[in-house]
Amino acid sequence: MSHPLTFTEEEATLLIDAQFFRKKAAITAKIRAMLEATHGALQNELAGLSLIVPPDFDPNLHQLVKGEHLEDFPYQYLDCPKYFSGANKFTFRTLVWWGHHVTCALLLEGSEIGRYKRQLLGRFHQLAGRDLELSLAPSLWEWKRGEGYTLPLTHDRKAQIAAVVAERSFLKVVRCVSLRDPRVREGRLAQMACETFQSMRPLVTP
């Protein structure tokens, strides 16, 4: 029986593979550049746009984040716009989760949540059928998708969605895209994020 601190043959091979780490660094830099381009594109998208937001919302705030441990996998994301103030949240996040998918998510909580819920149901058929999903997770910080985690916004699910959001204190609407998608492979993250934000606009515009 091997000692728990002993490297397996596969682990030892990976540990000394300098090319692997160079490739990881190169991929990280490319994703960072894609997210920077996404920031510029979203800023153009937000310019002059009227949104339902808390009174101290600043559309110019953003952040770029890189980490290694989202359930043991690297991740990089852009928040733009970025608004976290106490219980109030209005943030659009573009997350690249290595080994999983790209997620564009609108995170909404706080003083305007009642209005967002009314917009979701009142404009449901403008939002439905556009590859958007409602997060079912008990917090804003779960990024898995699929049964038990997300519910697709399809035209036949309005009553089901209404029942789900009735008791919720926040809303998280997402679009998840495979890392194999040509738009990801070809570096068109900015276009994808802007198209997703546009598809979500009925939820947050007067």
Image (cartoon, rainbow, N blue to C red):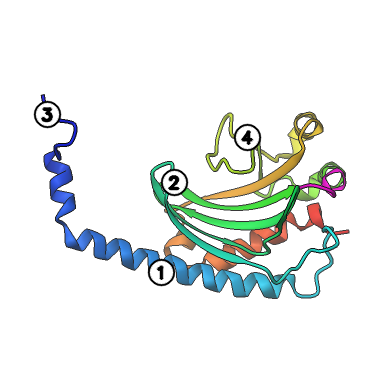
Q: Residues within 10 Å of mark 2 (few under 14, many from 20)?
A: some
Does 167 appear above or below 119? Answer: above
> Going by the image, does 93 lie left or right of 12?
right
Does 50 appear above or below 104? Answer: below
Does 153 appear above or below 66? Answer: above
Q: Residues within 10 Å of mark 3 (few under 14, many from 20)?
A: few
The residue where tag 3 is placed is: 2
Provide residue 20's location: percent of width, then percent of height.
23, 59
- Tell us which disc is closer to us: 3 or 1: 3
Marks 2 and 3, how far apart in space?
31 Å
The residue where tag 2 is placed is: 100
Question: Of label 2 and label 4, which has the lower sequence position?
Answer: 2
The residue where tag 1 is placed is: 30
Residue range in magenta is 109-115
Provide residue 64's location: percent of width, then percent of height.
54, 65
Q: In which quarter of the view is residue 128 placed?
A: top right
Amino acid type, label 1: Lys
Quadrant of the image for the C terminus? bottom right
Provide residue 7's location: percent of width, then percent of height.
15, 40
CB atoms of marks 2 and 4 within 8 Å: no
Amino acid type, label 4: Ala
Q: Mark 1: which secondary structure? A: helix
Marks 2 and 4, how far apart in space?
17 Å
Does 123 appear above or below 35? Answer: above
Marks 2 and 1, how far apart in space?
17 Å
